[in-house]
Structures are given as C-alpha cells and as structure tokens.
Amino acid sequence: MMYALARLGIDARLVSDAEAVREVDRIILPGVGAAGATVGSLTESGLVDALTERVLNEAIPFLGICVGLQILFEHSEEGDTDCLGWLPGKVQSFPASVRVPQIGWNSVRFVRDHALTKGLPEDPYLYFVNSFHAVPADADDVLGVTDYAGEFCSVVAHKNIAATQFHAEKSGEVGLRILTNFATWNGF
C-alpha cells in the first residue's frame, strides 16, 4: 500500500497508536489476513476507540481494503468474530461449491456514482484474494458488486466510509485511480 501511495505522490505514513490516528486527515485500513486477528490487533493496539472517534464521530474519510472492508460489519463467520459494527450486516463465506480463496482478476459493476469511481472504466477488472464476502443489511451501502458464485457486494460506501473487497494497490491503473480519488475525497 505504501509503495502505491508513494508512486502516486500521496503523502502517507503508517500509524500504530491512538495519538497518531488523531493526527491524520484520512485513514486507509489495508487488510491481509483474518477478521479475528485484525480486530484483535486493533483492540490490543488501542486503536479501535481512536478509529471510531475519528471515522464515526469526526467523519474523516476512511477507506478499508479487503479485511479492512469485512471488519466494518457487525459479525464475520470467519472465526465467529464480532467486528467493528460501523455498518449493519455480516460477512459470510463463499459456498463450498466454489474454489476459495477467490484469487485473481474479476470485474466490478458499480451500482451508483461516487467520488471513488470518478474516471473509472465501466465494469473494470480488479485484483481479489478473498474467501469471505460482506452482506450489508442496508442495500444503500452497496457501491459495487462482483460475480463469484453469484453476485456479492465488493465495494461499500456510506457517508465518509468506503471500502473495497479487492486490493486497489494491486489492481493496476484502475486501482491507482481509486486511491487517487480517495486522496482528494472530502468524505461526502
């Protein structure tokens, strides 16, 4: 993620404590790994309260990537994990009838306009690595969908919160455009 942001000339830094979270004007939460480990790490680091304050109460722009999308919801089947609960809904596994994890390029169909999608081609291909997917309780939170064992939510957007199931930083020029759009997004 840091390499992609540096390539775009976007000033970014890693933060690992609550004080540093209070000093930034937007947050990207990349994700690699499992929901339980991610929530556990954020909790142990004392970041959950700081993130919640900045994102929910102060409404700074937030972008979750992969597991960073999944932990936004109330609960994940992955490890039977209670997540942040910032968005209503759950995360569930793909059916046993398909290969998991889903690894590779898949198209995303955006269902409405949003600042993050400005300048993107129609139904772009982006890079996925996931065994689970979000099921938002509110259909208005869905920004993009992808077909893998049926249509699933692959991008969410709610007020100042946006997140992608795919890895924008590994998705070529389209992914870099999404990161550029996020860097200039005011959160609404």
Image: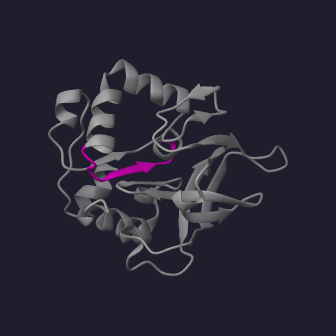
Residue at the right extreme of this rendering: 97
Give coordinates of residue 181: x percent, y percent. 31, 68
Residue 138 locus on image (x, y percent): 58, 54
Q: Residue at x 29, y 66 (%)?
A: 180
Whether residue 52 is situated above or below residue 177 in the rendered picture: above
Residue 182 pos. (x, y %): 31, 62
Q: Residue at the left extreme? A: 23
The residue located at (46%, 33%) in the rendering is 84
Magenta residues, start to end: 58-67
Residue 94 horizontal side relative to residue 56, left or right: right
- Residue 108 located within the stretch drawn in magenta: no
Residue at x-position 61% and y-position 34%: 76
Residue 114 to residue 57: above or below: below
Residue 100: image quadrant is top right
The residue nearer to you, when weighing 7 against 159, is 159
Split into 4 quadrants, where in the image is the C terminus? Answer: bottom left
* Number of dots carrying numbers: 0
Closer-to-camera residue (42/104)? 42
